């Protein structure tokens, strides 16, 4: 399968179809929970590992900035994250940024430091949650990062 895939064109033949539907719904609800996200205009699937990990690019109506309407969104068995498309330009860079930001949050939580300057994960800052996230990040670093397709952001957004 060639990525990215216009989300509206996925079919029951798409790998992990039901899980992808749920991941997309989670990503959509995550974005729509922010006051600045008026509505979702379009989305593309950039990585589909079902409930484990999905990466999307969403085009939104952004009430806070007319220049910031495209966002990467990462969801799965991890806390969701959005990143603007001015930074990471490929799926690999998105995953590397997720890992870096998650490790920073994990370190702060485990060291008993404030997470105020960390990425605002929707996760309780507990040792238990930090340990769970650390396991997911370890999987990303040891398994995914060297095997992830290097899919560039499409410039026609």
Image (cartoon, grey):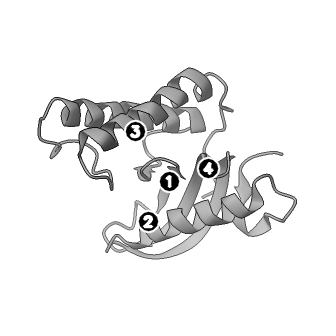
Residue 143: quadrant of the picture: top right
Spatial CA span between label 4 and label 3: 32 Å
**Which badge, 2 or 1, comes first in the chain's sequence?**
2
Name the spot of residue 8 as percent of width and height, x first: 73, 69
Label 4 vs label 3, nearer the camera? 3
Looking at the picture, tell me which residue is in the foreground, 123 or 11.
123
Spatial CA span between label 1 and label 3: 17 Å
Q: Is residue 148 left or right of residue 136?
A: right
Label disc, if present, on residue 155 of the rendered structure? 4
* Circle 2/circle 1 CB separation < 8 Å: yes
Label disc, if present, on residue 33 of the rendered structure? none
The residue depicted at 33 percent of the width and 56 percent of the height is 122
Label 4 vs label 2, nearer the camera? 2
Per the image, label 2 sits on a secondary structure element best described as: helix
Label disc, if present, on residue 73 of the rendered structure? 1
Q: Residue furthest left?
A: 113
* Rendered view: 140 above or below 43: above
Name the spot of residue 116 as percent of width and height, x first: 15, 46
Label disc, if present, on residue 133 of the rendered structure? 3
Per the image, label 4 sits on a secondary structure element best described as: loop
Label disc, if present, on residue 30 of the rendered structure? 2
- Please tell me how crowded label 3 is: few (under 14), some (14-19), or many (20+) other residues with Cα within 10 Å: many
Residue 16: quadrant of the picture: bottom right
**Which badge, 4 or 2, comes first in the chain's sequence?**
2
Per the image, label 1 sits on a secondary structure element best described as: strand
Can residue 97 be seen here? Answer: no
* Rendered view: 142 above or below 73: above
Q: Residue furthest right?
A: 13
Label 3 vs label 2, nearer the camera? 3
**Which badge, 4 or 3, comes first in the chain's sequence?**
3
**Which badge, 3 or 2, comes first in the chain's sequence?**
2
The residue depicted at 79 percent of the width and 66 percent of the height is 9
């Amino acid at each position: 399968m060639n990525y990215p895939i216009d989300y509206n064109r996925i079919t029951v033949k798409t790998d992990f179809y039901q899980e992808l539907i749920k991941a997309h719904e989670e990503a959509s609800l995550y974005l729509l929970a922010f006051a600045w996200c008026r509505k979702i205009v379009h989305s593309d699937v950039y990585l589909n590992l079902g409930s484990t990990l999905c990466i999307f690019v969403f085009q939104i109506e952004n009430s806070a900035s007319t220049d910031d309407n495209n966002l990467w969104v990462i969801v799965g068995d991890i806390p969701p994250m959005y990143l603007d498309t001015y930074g990471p330009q490929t799926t690999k860079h998105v995953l590397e940024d997720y890992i870096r930001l998650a490790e920073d949050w994990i370190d702060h939580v485990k060291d008993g430091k404030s997470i105020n300057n960390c990425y605002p994960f929707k996760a309780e800052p507990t040792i238990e949650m930090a340990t769970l996230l650390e396991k997911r990040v370890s999987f990303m670093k040891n398994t995914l990062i060297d095997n992830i397709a290097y899919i560039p952001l499409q410039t026609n957004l």
